[in-house]
Amino acid sequence: MKRLYPFLSRRRVAILEACIIGLVSGLAAVALKQGVEGLIQWRSEPIVSTWLLFPTIGLIGGWLSGWAIQQFAPETSGSGIPHIKAVLGYVPMALNLRVALVKLVSTLLALGSGLSLGRQGPTVQIGAALAAQLSHWVPTSPEYRRQLISAGAAAGLAAGFNAPISGILFVVEELLQDFSGLTLGSAILASFVGAVVSRLLGGQGLNLTMGTLPVGLGLADLPFLVLLGLMAGVLGTLFNRGIFASLSFFRRMKGISLPGRVGLAGLLTGLVGIWLPIAAQDNTGLREFLVTGEAGWQLIAVAFLAKFGLTLIAYGSGAPGGIFAPTLVLGSALGCLVSFLAQGIYGGLGLPLVAASTTTYALTGMGAFFSAVTRVPITAIVIVFEMTANFNLVLPLMIGAGIAYLISERVASGSVYSGLLRWQGIELEATPTATNPWMNLTAADLMQRRVETLSSQMTLQEAMEAFSRSHHRGFPVVDGRRLVGIVTQSDLGAAKVQAREAALPLTQIMTPHPVTVNPTASLTQVLHLLNQLKISRLPVTQEGKLVGIITRGDIIRAESDQVSGQANPPGPQASPSYPVYQIRGPATGQGRLLLPLSDPNSAPLLLQMALAMAKAQQYEVECLHVIKVPRSVPPPEATVDLRSARRLLWRAERLGRQQGVSVHGQIRVAHEVARTLLEVIKERHIDLILMGCNGRPRRQGGCWGRLWIR
């Protein structure tokens, strides 16, 4: 692919990469689906007694799954979605081909042995890991790597559920919470390809065959749909708290390794499956059984409790698997119970009202419980809609999922995945979002004040010579300081075609009375004139006098400066630095010392000095490595090599651990080193700076200095 890069535009490369990501993610999802179904079918064969088969397979399969994770990729424990959030937040965690392969094999063993988890969360991590590996093989910028990982995650979810729209929405709602046009385009294409591959090779997957099952909404259903949303919100929050309680319980079992914990969860699942066969069913079969409403309320209540408890045990053990499918099963069971309640009340009281079918409540419960647990209500609505392809479900889903989301956020706000990261000691810093500051820009903020002009007294020949000396394609024509016209290369070309005389006055070929704006005109007005009149430059006049000129490049630069809070003069400007890598230690110090690192030769000495000073002052150390790029290259789009810089930060972290000093570190891509230092000082609340200098010292004994910041 590297050889093809010179012949491909950026958009074509993005399309090609998105297609590749969607293809491999779809194939991985199909392999996982077929493998899990094959193992479950084999487990159901009457080889030996069920009371011996289920616990034995659960124990052995769980132990092998945990062993694979422990030996080859500890990052693959759990669903994998918190891991992706951390990587997208620039937390240094592995996400590559090894992670994808170990996740695939370990999930296959865990789910095939009967653990009550889903395969859709793992397919998200597998897709993201494959995309991250592609970004390692093909040189790219840090921001574009985020886009590829996001596209891989979307493709994984789309392939797992055969729901491409849901894959895109989940990335936007949960993983990124911000996106560009290129990010969204890559995610859409990757999701589409992944879903197509999964549908063609893996069948319908989790899609429900509705057939003639009745789905509808009536006035009698509204109070019970509200009740369903309330119950889903409360029970979804309880489910999330149960996850953390289970994780904490298994963490306290220090004498049992990860393989032992996962094997124990498999053993318990197998034992429950002996006495309660419905709990031993896979998620798809159990959910379809509940949606049809064929079971009685007693069996459904038992199934709900069993699934609830077994899922918490399996996830808390560290087994690889997601909570998407279990939450859908739990939601469908809850919806069935509310449906039976509605039918019992209306029938028992003899009211002339009839509740909707059990199917309607079961499907609404799926979306409501999913929304309460994952806190992505739009994805919850769309994912059930895509699985059923029934428009009559949209309104019930909106009622149930919306109320469940509001209740769960009121009881305990925040995503379960962000909570899982905090449980691991990882706190992602929120990315500040701009609130359209450029809407307050005026023509005075946008215009260039140093304007090259042509005199109205010039001849055609003199104007042509002026154009040949400049890179501009058009000039205002002035008489003194008063604007009288504008001339462009097109005007000169037309004059050449007509064989005009070289001594012809410029006023005869210029465009007189050009469109202008005053300095107080808004950005909206400026853009409207540029777009409506198809012009590339707009003179700014005040009382007829030329005071500036605006081009599209000036608008882009002014918006960038406004967003970054800078007020810079016209000309090429330095963009804010862009963080591409960071490590974070515990915030235990009474202050923070900033140590810029650039030279590997002087770094060891500076590190020792900084750690000694920090230990004496009870400070933390913030290490910073700046990679400088030309101003013509935006920092988020720069292709950089992080290997040597990472080694410096890892060394600093290791030395800090040895000396008992908390060490943080970050790598930033920037245009200006000094500006980056000021940004870090402000963002990280720096109290002290220790800087080394290269070159020959001017006085004896000094090759470093320090600066106290009050």
Image: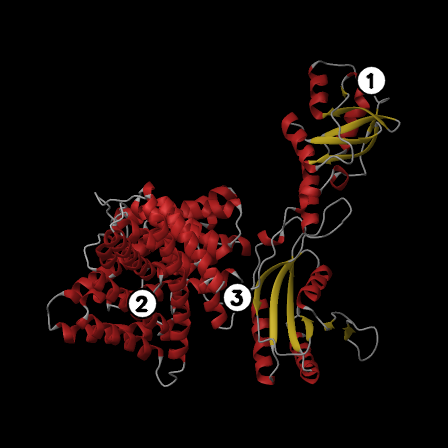
Towards the viewer: 430 or 71: 430
Residue type at mark 2 is Phe
Disc 3 target residue = 91
Disc 2 target residue = 308
Q: Position of residue 651 (x, y in %)?
A: 58, 76
SS under mark 2 = helix
Residue type at mark 1 is Pro
Residue type at mark 3 is Val
SS under mark 1 = loop
- Of callouts 3 and 1, the N-terminal one: 3
Is residue 58 in sight in this rendering? yes
Give the position of the C terminus as an image quadrant. Answer: bottom right
Closest to the camera, between mark 3 and mark 1, is: 3
Towards the viewer: 328 or 257: 328
Dot 1: few (<14), some (14–19), or many (≥20) neighbours within 10 Å?
A: some
Towards the viewer: 172 or 414: 414
Dot 3: few (<14), some (14–19), or many (≥20) neighbours within 10 Å?
A: some
Q: Residue at x 81, y 18 (%)?
A: 507
In the rendered structure, find residue 505 and report the number of the disc placed on it. Answer: 1
Give the Cα separation between the discs numbered 2 and 1: 87 Å
